[in-house]
Image: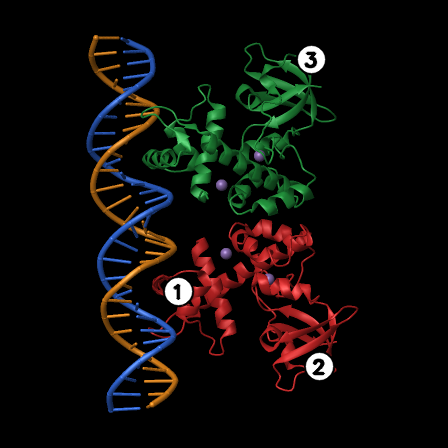
Chain colours: A red, B green, C orange, D blue
Amino acid sequence: MASETVENYIKAIYVLCRESPSGEAGVVRLAQEVGVTKGTATSMIKRLAKSKLVKAPRYSGVTLTAMGKKIALDVLRRHRIIETFLVSTLNLDWADVHEEAERLEHALSPRTLDRLDEFLGRPSTDPHGDPIPSASGKVLELRGKALSAFARGAKVEIVQIMDQDRAFLKFVAQSGLKPRVRALVQDVSAQGDSITLRVTRGKSVTLSRSAASKILARLQ
Amino acid sequence: MASETVENYIKAIYVLCRESPSGEAGVVRLAQEVGVTKGTATSMIKRLAKSKLVKAPRYSGVTLTAMGKKIALDVLRRHRIIETFLVSTLNLDWADVHEEAERLEHALSPRTLDRLDEFLGRPSTDPHGDPIPSASGKVLELRGKALSAFARGAKVEIVQIMDQDRAFLKFVAQSGLKPRVRALVQDVSAQGDSITLRVTRGKSVTLSRSAASKILARLQ
DNA sequence: CCATAAAGTTTGAGTCGTCAAACTTTAGTT
DNA sequence: AACTAAAGTTTGACGACTCAAACTTTATGG
Ligand SMILES: [Mn+2]
Ligand SMILES: [Mn+2]
Ligand SMILES: [Mn+2]
Ligand SMILES: [Mn+2]
């Protein structure tokens, strides 16, 4: 069984690989994500490589092996099911559940996880719109494109918020933007550095390009 | 914040102190409970003493300080609320939830614990009848006496099962004996080494003295 | 009151996960 | 091609937790 620490590294590597265009995770970003120094990250990567969970050519990027990917998806599944439970059953705040799930994800047995999943009605996404990997390890990725990519006049439905930062999530929720919410693209600035939305039965919101790029949507 | 390991030791010390007539925990029993060698237990006790969580005169028994007791009751509260959730909401088996709670108890924030408690309707006991300490650290102990102490003809109500062992719990459940179940003491053997109960609207069960001493009941 | 077993302690060593700081490699300027 | 900053690695050290095995103290029952 992978330790809590190992699970955290593996999950972080998975997420970073998804994010980077090269499909590889860098040591510095990994260290930052896990909250350790880069030296520590290097030595952990070595151990992960020894246990065949990652491939890590010297002085180059880290990628997961099939085994590593299996673990990552497993942890991600637990994480997202827990987040769903915390929001939909315990009514915890959208912005707070990530940290909580960060700890709980390491303490659930497969059986309990399945019961929880059943109790929740086998949800396919978590409260942020992140897809929940199936028990067998399949995920649907990229269910929308960045808000910043839509043109004026587009009628969109928010699909996914791709950031776990509390302050950002608070801001997004404040604006009324949650998965399943519909909105009209009211304006896109000439330089493309901001976008204004009118939320259906809600207010208008202006987002910076960087904020808009972290919110995925699709045409209604 | 106390580590997971420290929480486990402290909780075990609390339980052992409750069990022993002297009110002190022995090193060998503690080691056994936590699952380490006695040398390991000794060195942990030293560290706990240094952080003022226990009092441990050399070559003598261990007791909790006020600080230690606070932590113990806190962990116990988490443990029992989680057990209640696992049984009453997720329908997990009575006999399985202890191990699961053993891990989850270290991963719940106070806020989430309170939401869970609220969701469950602020239960006062867990599925085994163990009292749940209040958030401020109060517990009702000894809400019944051992089944073995009742006389023939007594009409009793099961209150609490004082053992977490899976096999024992399976056996007890098999017999239909759960907290709140009522039964008649049908017979007590002359030597007092066994007791026969007739469970209300159920079958008759004969328990050994040692089994009966781990089941608490009170007169109906 | 003493021998012996049980309880408790000490010692030396190992793993895991971490840091700071020195070092090496890589990649992007000029 | 040479310089430099960023990325990555190595080294030495440490704390938390553990074990096995040798050792000491305590209890007790003959
Ligand atoms: Mn985590
Ligand atoms: Mn999420
Ligand atoms: Mn535990
Ligand atoms: Mn219990």
Q: Position of residue A139 (x, y in %)?
A: 59, 68
Q: Nearer the viewer, residue B87 or B53?
A: B53
Tag 1 near tag 3, CB within 8 Å:
no
Q: Which residue is mark 2?
A: A187
Q: Nearer the viewer, residue B180 or A171?
A: A171
| Image quadrant where one finds the C terminus of chain A | bottom right
State the residue lying farthest toward the right: A201
Say whether disc 2 or disc 1 marks the residue closer to the N-terminus: 1
Q: Is residue A142 above or below residue B200?
A: below
Give the spatial CA distance, label 2 vs label 3: 83 Å
Mark 2, Cα crowd under 10 Å, few <14 / some 14-19 / many 20+, is some
Q: Chain of mark 2?
A: A
- Residue kind at label 3, given as amino acid type: Gly
Residue beneath the point at 53% across and 47% down? B107
> What is the quadrant of residue B81 in the picture?
top right
Q: Nearer the viewer, residue A201 or B101?
A: A201
